[in-house]
Image: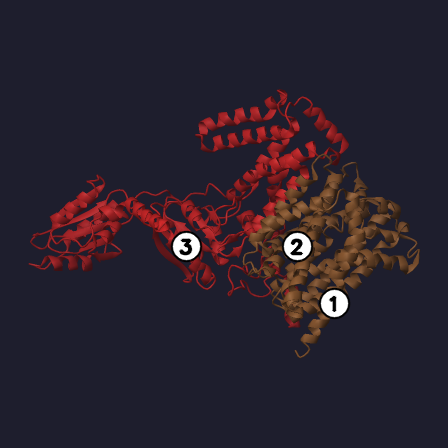
Chain colours: A red, B brown
Amino acid sequence: MLFQWKVSKRKNTINEQSGQAQTVPSGEIDNRLDANIETIRRTTGNSTDVVIRRFMLGKEKNIQAAIIFLSGIVDESMIYQFLLESVVQIDFPSSCLPNEALLYVEQKIAAAGKMRRMKQWNHLFLSLMSGETLLFVDGVSEALSIDTKGGEHRAIEEPSTQLAIRGPREGFTESLGTNIAMIRRRIKNPNLWVEAITIGEVTQTNVSLMYIKGIANDEIVEEVRTRLRRIHIDAILESGYIEQLIEDQTFTTFPTIYHTERPDIVAANLLEGRIAILVEGTPFVLVAPAVFIQFFQAVEDYYARFDIATALRLLRVLIFFLSLIAPALYIALTTFHQEMIPTQLVIAIAAQRESVPFPAFVEALMMEVTFEILREAGVRLPRAIGQAVSIVGALVIGQAAVEAGIVSSTMVIIVSITAIASFATPSFAIAISARLIRFLLMFLATLFGLYGIMIGVIFMTLHLCSLRSFGVPYMSPLAPLIPTNIGDTLFRFPIWALKERPRLINETNMIRQGKQQRPMPPNESKKEGDDH
Amino acid sequence: MERVQLSARQLFMLAILFEHGSAIVIPLGVDAKQDVWLAILCGMALGSLLFLVYYRLFTYYPTVPFTSYSQQIVGTFFGKGIALVYVLYFLYIAARVLRDFGELLLTFAYPETPLFVLNAVMMLTIMYAAYKGIEVLARAGELFFAFLYLIAVLGFVLVIVVGVIDIHRLQPVLEEGWKRVFKVVFTQTLYVPFGEMIVFTMLFPYVNERKKVKIAGWLAIWLSGINLALTMAMNIAVIGADAVSRSTFPLLNTIQEIRIANFLERLDVLFMIALVIGGFFKISVFFYAGVIGAADLFQIKEHQRLIYPLGLAVLLLSIAIANNFAEHIKEGLNIVTIYMHIPLQVVIPVLLLIIAAIRNRHM
């Protein structure tokens, strides 16, 4: 009983939130123009951006008609210059009926692309709100919805996250259509399929699902689709909403869905069989399923030569661990295991710590928290003030704290290294989870020294191994080990050696290149040819 | 039983980590003096025969764990009795290894910390692993396997580079003949760690490639046998047989000999990593086997329910098992080997195999 009551109560609240279900008039439109205009006025509360332009149609100009659109989200020049002008100038036969007039408009106007006849109010309002122009004719109980979407958008710019020295310079924008086009331009293949879903009871946000049919695993596509359809919420304002509503596990600090601003990354992931989720109004596109190692793969790894890419990738993994355990290690070594530090160094550290009145944990915690405050302040401040903060921060975190005897200079070095390391991870999502775990490890190191750090790392590894992203083990292809895919993990083998797509993500269409893609000097390749 | 699958490779890596477990850090079979490496290799050879017994039992009943087929072989009543004994054995050994581990940690780095706290932290991690299941443990095993091997190779290279190895310390070979070697084999090295593979009879049914189980197990035994023999031989070659037999952690003493350019020294952290990771996997496998054995025996569908009570029991047992470390070691060498390892690792499996072979002779 209790359970049922809860369910019914929840249903009520959703209905209350979803404004559309309540205020949008149900049913079909009237055949009187005035009544229809009145309905629209009433429903939109006389909003000032609803433009209603009445005019007369027909040879004798005796048929009343009106176009209605929302200024700002439509292409107004198109409406005025082409649509309105051509509607008025159509050569109507004499004494045509209102119904025929509408048919004429539909057939004769070439200026607009998509055009649909509609009767239902809820469909009409959805079209109106997403930037289409409605054309009503007096005496007809049907309206024409003409696609005139437009309005101001941010131009394509260089992405502000995931910068690359070598690689394309364009990043996604807030416009869904532009984003889809940017991916299309990279993969010119009819098998690149786009599915549209509208999510959000109030916001009616357009969400697109993109995948390459034949490469993406159909089961995972279906899983993504069902998870998206299951979402029943009032608003989707950013792809982060969707990410949190469809991820496999909420109670983890690790991201199980990848997000990016770069179309080339999305294209590469689609080609590996992953699925992209594009959300209207945000330049961040989701990519699923994601694996742990993906967050260490910078886009340049594939554009640079393999030896350099491998070295950089190993460096990044090292950086991740450094940003995880550096302060914890400092605490463990200075409090528990002084004998493990070389003698001269331990003397130097002890001499510095002589004047510090706090235990190592408090010292480390203070500096780490200070740094986190500085970083958080720096992110949201206007640029002009940001300068001031960084100067103050450099003084506080640096010399002044040491001179005041609050922290040792070794600690400052440790904190600086950790801070820089946490910025050097190519994905912000994974760097931020490392920041949280760092504090946990510091705490464990205070209690149990190195043993505590190791226990923490074992715990973290177990947790990572238990995660899945849309059914794909998070640590694959490292654990479970998939030897054919190991070339693109901690290392990046030469492109010609990466013959197969990730095995757990797509299961059928595996091979991605022809045989013998390894470049060979002409002589050798001829010899090879003779052998066969 | 959990509905999960392990690959033969995962079984292999888990077995390697399990075999190395605590064996690599303790003075294993040092009664054989400088012939200890021979004792380990002989133990390995006999251990692979013993593994064949476990494997044959598995081939008769490939879908169920040991605690189930014991009931099919000797009937429900006796079979359940045997299963119960094995469940208790696994949990007891888990507690023993936990005690070993805690004591080692205590003497090595944490003289001020109570044993109970050290053990409790470890046990919590192990309970978490058991809660997540064998699949997660095996995956973590794959990661730590690579990590541990990297460290081991690094350590070996460093010891060789430093030049502290003196081969003459390994001589004379067979000073007192084979008798001393075989005495150590049959009282120590055969059972720990090789005979302890009996615990994997609980995990075989999870493996999805049944035909590869034998080779995976054998490879694990051989590789870990060679590694252990090499490690102990290295210990003796670096610090001498006498020092090894008196030391609590011969490996630690060896690692401490590494000194390069006044910079790379005191690499105790390497030892610590080997100790904690090895201990974790060894206790986890025993504990998990005990938990799923109990779940199987008492027909509890979710093994997770047993983790808290049994985990607490193992933790308390690890403390109550002995008054001090010396007593603990003495019990291990004198009582556990004769009354537990020999009957449970050798006698009962062989008897079960004979009965099973007679019962299934028409197959």
The reply to whether residue B46 is in sight is yes
User: What residue sits right under mark 1 in the picture?
Assistant: B350
Q: Is residue A23 left or right of residue B243?
A: left
Q: Chain of mark 1?
A: B
Pair 1/3: label in front = 1
Which chain does the residue under circle 3 lie in?
A
- Secondary element type, mark 2: helix
- Per the model, the C-alpha gap separating discs 3 and 2 is 36 Å
Task: Decide if residue A4 is on the left or right side of residue A434.
Answer: left
Q: Which mark is residue B270?
A: none
Identity, as a three-letter code, of the amino acid under mark 3:
Arg
User: Where is A200 relative to A503, above or below?
Assistant: above
Taking the view exactly as shown, the residue that stands out farthest to the front is B77
Q: In this picture, is B56 found above or below B156?
A: below
Q: Nearer the viewer, residue B126 or A282?
A: B126
- The residue under label 2 is B285
Real-space CA distance between mark 1 and mark 3, rounded to the nearest whole angstrom: 53 Å
Q: Is residue B225 visible?
A: no
Q: Quickly name the residue at label 3.
A: A227
